[in-house]
Amino acid sequence: MSPSDSARSGAGAGGRRAAAPPPSTPTRSEARQASGRPKSGRGATFSVLMMTIAALVGVGVLAAQAEATAPKVRAQSSSASTTKTSTKSGSSSSDSSAIALPANSGSGTRIVYSPSTKRVWLVEGSTVERTMRVVPGTIAASAGSYTVSEKTPGATGGDNVQVLYVVRFNSGSSTTYGFDAEANITGLPPAPTGQTSGIRMAQLDAQALYEFASVGTVVVIV
C-alpha cells in the first residue's frame, strides 16, 4: 500500500482524520488536593481552636499545682503588748497567767498598773484595749486610785532623761508620777539609774497610752 493509500485509509470513510478526545477538566476538589491546600478554611480554624483549648487546660493544671505547693503564711503576734481582750475572761490570748487583768482593779474606763508584774492595762468599759510591759521608776507609787492630771508630748524626767508621751497623775501631792517613753529608744528602755517616778515603756505603747488617756481618766494601781 502506498503512502497515499495509508493516508486515505486513516481518514476513514468520510475522508477526515478522527479528532483526539479533549483533555478532561479537573474538578474543584481535585484541584485543591493537587495544590496541597485544605478543602476549606473550617479545618484550619478547628485545629487552631483545639490547640488553644489544650494550652488553656495546661495553664490551669500548672496554676492548681502552684497553689497546692505555695507556703502558707500565718500572722504572728508580739509578746510585748496585746490588744482587745475581754475582762470577762480575765486573760489575753497570749500568756493568761502573765497578762490577766488583776482582780479588784475597778470598773469602767481606766488605766490599771501593777508594779509587781510590771504591766499596764488600758481598759475601755469591759474590754482591755491594750496591755503592755513597763519599766517601773525608782520611786514607786502606792496602791490606790488616782486621776490623770496632765499630758505633754515631751519633757525631762527626774533622772534628767528626755522622755516622750508623758501622762502624769497624782500631781496634787508631793510626788507626781507619770507614764512615758525614753527618747531615742524604740523598745523597752533599761531600768533607770537615777531617781525618777516615771513609769517607762516602749514608744509605741507610750503613744497608745497617751492617746487613750484624758485629763480625769482614772489610774488604778494594784
Image (spheres, rainbow, N blue to C red):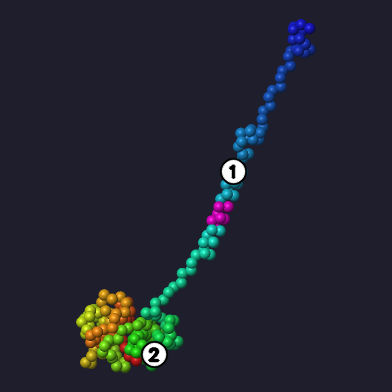
Secondary structure at badge 1 equals: helix
Residue 126 quadrant: bottom left
- The quarter of the image holding the N terminus is top right
Magenta span: predominant SS is helix
Give the residue drawn at x 76%, y 13%. 10
Q: Is residue 102 magenta?
A: no
* Circle 2 residue: 102
**Residue at 56 percent of width and 50 percent of height:** 52
Q: Quadrant of residue 132?
A: bottom left
Residue 58 magenta: yes
Report whether residue 47 is seen.
yes
Crowd rating for badge 2 (residues with CA inside 10 Å; few <14, some 14–19, many 20+): some
Q: Residues within 10 Å of mark 1 (few under 14, many from 20)?
A: few
Q: Whole-percent x and y of residue 155?
A: 22, 80
Q: Mark 1 — residue? A: 44
Tell me the distance, in whole angstroms, between the alpha carbons under discs 2 and 1.
80 Å
Q: Nearer the viewer, residue 42 or 128?
A: 128
- Residue visible at 41% across and 76% down? 77
Magenta segment: 53-60
Q: Looking at the image, which residue is at 71% across and 22% down? A: 21
In-image side of 177 versus 12 (left or right): left
Q: x and y percent of residue 134 in the render?
A: 32, 83
The percent coordinates of residue 55 (x first, y second) are 55, 52
Q: Which amino acid type is marked by label 1? A: Ala
* Front residue of this view, candidates 42 and 175: 175
**Tag nearer the camera, 2 or 1:** 2
Which comes before the other along the chain, label 2 or label 1?
A: 1
**Mark 2, secondary structure of its residue:** loop
Q: Check the picture and name the quadrant holding the C terminus.
A: bottom left
